[in-house]
Amino acid sequence: MSAILYLVIPCYNEEEMLPITSEVLLNKREELIRLGKISPESRILFVNDGSKDATWDIIKGLHEKNRAFSGLNLSRNRGHQNALLAGLMYAKDHADISISMDADLQDDPNAINGMIECYENGCDIVYGVRDDRKEDTFFKRKSAECFYRLMTFLGTEVKENSADFRLMSKRALEALSEFREVNLFLRGMVPLLGFKQGTVTYKRASRAAGESKYPLRKMLAFSFEGITSFSIVPIRMITYLGVMIFLISLLFLIWGVVQKFRGLTVQGWSSLITSVWAIGGLILLAIGVVGEYIGKIYLEVKDRPRYIIEDILD
Ligand code: UDP
Ligand code: MG
């Protein structure tokens, strides 16, 4: 029997895109059913993220006309990641596989075939990876590059050049539901799940209608979220800085004494300059140590699962 697929599409003020998107995805669904890749029970699930325009009315209309379309309506705007999670958690209970994609068709629906093939070959998670970033502005390309470098440096595994276009099997979704954190950064969480993971490359199109719902402000907030939700390295850096400054103060101490005996200083300078650096270093060190504990509390509070079982032989 072929798998039930739920396409999960978060939508925020997408009234211009939805008529186009729904048409394209419906055709894709029919093609996949015809090929016997997915079950006729498969659905296209739109998640309305508290849109201020007619998005929800359009989704309701689509559902009236064709039961292939389902909808979830969030009570208010909660942001892309939360809307996506809501859709995925719904799909977990109704589908065998989910594929999340944006409402603006920037994620190529034709890559879905490859993703399902990967799933059939045993992958539980399949990332859609962009072949290049030619569509992006210079600024966006460079800032994305910096972001991925920084994330890797801070010890977080993220799949480079993949956004939230990905396939996840039911059991991957079940594992994801064990992650109880509220500061969501899905593309950092998914690699933590483990299982067999695959990639499919695709060409990212530009947005066909409407405008981006991710202005620079939101993008910066999102990357900050990604960094602080996954790493306590920034706190640790304070500790390192404290140690460094304290060591510098020792150098100043030696230098100050030498200068004093050479008679090159004014009265009180050596003791002052040494204590300024020493106290500064010790304060930073102390903050860093306190921060270490806060970091631990932070990780505990997240209540992430400590392991995920892939198979059981019984
Ligand atoms: N989106 C959402 N809630 C928000 C912002 C965006 O659900 O608060 C959805 C949006 O409808 C789209 C997806 O997230 O389906 C990606 O947004 P967009 O295409 O505007 O981002 P970009 O491609 O410009 O980064
Ligand atoms: Mg987009």
Image: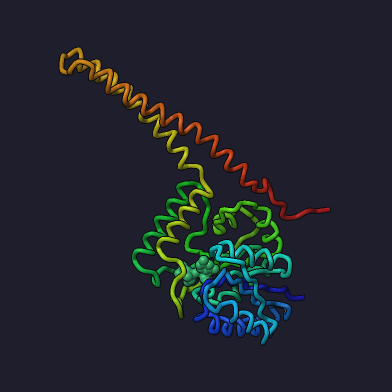
Horizontal and vertical percent position of residue 147: 43, 55
Is residue 111 positioned above or below 89 on the image? below
Residue 131 in view in this figure: no
At x 61%, y 74%, the residue is 46
Please name whichever residue, 210 or 78, is drawn nearer the observer in this view of the structure. 78
How many numbered discs?
Answer: 0
**Foreground residue among 184 and 140:** 184
Give the image quarter of residue 237. Answer: top left
- Using the image as rendered, state which of residue 121 and residue 234 is in the foreground: 234
At 44% from the left edge and 71% from the top edge, which residue is drawn? Answer: 212
Indicate the colouring scheme: rainbow
Q: Residue at coordinates 35% horizontally, 24% vertically from top-left?
A: 278
Give how far across and how far down residue 234 sits, in percent. Answer: 45, 42
Instruction: Please provide percent x and percent y for residue 256.
Output: 24, 19
- Residue 251 in sight from this viewpoint: yes
Which residue occupies 25% across, 20% down?
255
Quarter containing the N terminus: bottom right
Closest to the observer, 17 or 242: 17
Point out the residue furthest to the top here. Answer: 261
